[in-house]
Amino acid sequence: MVHLIIVNIFVFLLDINIFALEYVGLYNVQTFYKTLVYRVKLKLEFSILNRLVKLTKSSRASSYTQSSGGEGGVQLPRIFDGTQVTER
């Protein structure tokens, strides 16, 4: 949670810098800096998404093992069993 807040504050500060460059009228610097900022923001968004995926996978796995009462997790029904295939 702290990581998410820190990243959002950092992204906000990067956006303020872009607006300041636009306001001052430094178009050449702004276009170079904007590509750099967007690249950094994309990497930060992927780091947040990766953490969210890890969080959901770990919470899903722990809820499965808790709900089944054992170490095996939830037993899902078999839709297709390879032993029941017959040749024609």
Image (cartoon, grey):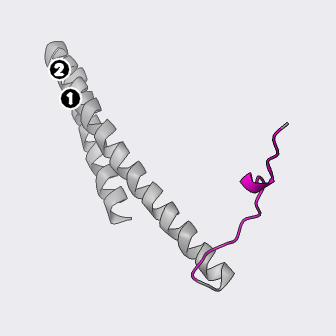
Report helix, strand or loop for mark 2.
helix
Q: Is residue 4 left or right of residue 33?
A: right
Image quarter where the N terminus lies is: bottom left
Query: What is the magenta range?
Result: 71-87
Is 73 above or below relative to 4?
below
Q: What residue sits right under mark 1 in the picture?
A: 36
Which of 81 and 70 lies nearest the eye of the viewer? Answer: 81
Report helix, strand or loop for mark 1.
helix
Q: Quadrant of residue 18?
A: top left
Q: Which label sits on residue 57?
A: none
Is 23 above or below relative to 4?
above
Q: Residue at x 57, y 67 (%)?
A: 60
Please indicate, yes or no, whether residue 70 appears anywhere in the rendered image.
Answer: yes
Q: Residue at x 36, y 44 (%)?
A: 46
Do the numbered discs 2 and 1 sit on residues whose CB atoms are within 8 Å?
yes
Three-letter amino acid code at disc 2?
Phe
Q: Which label sits on residue 32?
A: 2
Three-letter amino acid code at disc 1?
Leu
Q: Residue at x 62, y 85 (%)?
A: 70
Is 84 above or below relative to 87?
below
